[in-house]
Image: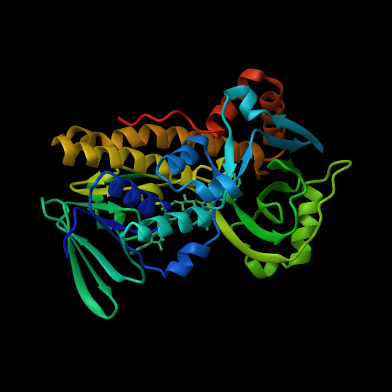
Amino acid sequence: MRTQVGIVGAGPAGLLLSHLLHRRGIECVVLELRSRQYCETRIRAGVLEQGTAELLRAIGVGERMAREGLVHHGIVLRFDRRDHRIDLSGLTGRAITVYGQHEVVKDLIAARLAAGGEILFEVAGVEVADVDTPAPRIRFRHAGAHRELRCDFVAGCDGFHGVCRSSIPPRALSTYEHTFPHAWLGVLARVPPPSEELIYASHERGFALQSMRSPELSRLYLQCAPTDELEAWPDDRIWDELRRRFEREGWTLPEGPVLHKGITAMRCFVADPMQYGRLFLVGDAAHIVPPTGAKGLNLAAADVRVLARALDAHYAEGRGDLLERYSAVCLRRVWKVQRFSSWMTSMLHRSAGGPFFDRLRHAELDYVTGSRAASTALAENYVGLPFEDG
Ligand code: FAD
Ligand code: DHB
């Protein structure tokens, strides 16, 4: 098999890249470890920055998002049992769209297949070779047969646990890591969201977040210990803890059947550079941010824009300078998003630091909600920093 760009991974990054390349007349093949159904039902992020939503619309995959996505103009920070609204649109002129990551994935897969795009699901044993030569190869197994995909470039869109990053010699890569001593228990429940806007609650018992997927489905998160197992969190305990952390006069949390629950670690990770020879790392394969800023998916989409444009410049104009700058351009945004996500995490989560740090966090919340300048800084990061496409 031969193509121009071999893409490993059919998450948001790989699918979006394949769709952008297709629109620019560049051939690609996507290789995915899991089944189509698994990819389309994996519950993860839900907040799209305005720029991400605009990109999906501009490339013709925004139709269902326009119907079913929920455009939000503000978020609420709840502490001391009171609400403090951050007026995202009033402060920045921009908004966010709440639309599940798996819905984005469904829309992208449907668009790729309708356009005759090639996505091979359930491939195994993916190995990337010769990326430091002009003729990289990807070896894999599919439907019981050993296959090889020859290509000009490899896009490693295979997430944090994928094989692409680990195929780079360690001497060629610096990595930066921090793990927070918290985790999130995420719950999807069939119950109407009690508030129209997202609520980020900071409470003595720990952080809690109320989000949604539709007028009938709530998405809720609770700070828990990274060592907690799901068995420690029966539904009754989840609802009890959520009620306590969201406590506010005149506000009640309705209960409903829990459809899904999972625990996510809170980790920061950056690989630098995001390129080795003709292998480009994209999205979670290159970096992880803690979920408090709702940025993982949006950052993956930002990398994709930069790479698609650079590949287009290579094929259409014979220019290599944008590909050479790919990593530097992406990393500027990555570190700013890392900064914002870590700041939101530290401000909102209970830590073991003791009373001094509890007071500092409280002062931070008080300042952010009381100062227009500080609210604006939060808002402009939350709706998404401007793109620098190199
Ligand atoms: P992924 O979505 O991870 O996609 C990678 C794809 O590559 C997957 O389909 C995988 O099956 C495939 N793959 C892996 N290895 C191989 C291989 N060897 N061969 C072929 N294919 C391979 N972000 C938020 O903003 N808010 C959240 O609430 C949130 N919750 C999250 C919960 C979890 C459990 C996780 C893991 C992440 C969460 N994130 C969240 C982050 C966000 O979902 C990611 O940033 C986003 O999925 C990144 O997209 P991606 O395409 O780079 O990677
Ligand atoms: C959601 C996830 C986040 O990480 C976040 O900060 C806000 C909302 C969500 O899944 O809806």
Q: Which residue is painted at 66% across and 19% down in the image?
A: 372
User: Residue 11: in sight, yes or no?
Assistant: no
Q: Which residue is painted at 68% across and 42% down in the image?
A: 198
**Which of the two residues, 226 or 295, is positioned nearer the viewer here?**
295
- Residue at the extreme left of the image, as rendered: 134
Residue 238 horizontal side relative to residue 383, left or right: right
Residue 238 at x, y percent in the picture: 74, 60
Q: Which colour scheme is used?
A: rainbow
**Which of the two residues, 220 or 197, is positioned nearer the viewer here?**
197
Quarter assignment of residue 321? top left
Q: Which residue is painted at 28% across and 51% down in the image?
A: 155
User: Residue 230: in sight, yes or no?
Assistant: yes
* The image quadrant in which ligand 1 is located: bottom left
- Residue at the extreme bottom of the image, as rendered: 144
Above/below status of 221 relative to 330: below
Residue 354 horizontal side relative to residue 104, left or right: right
Question: Which quarter shows the N terminus?
Answer: bottom left
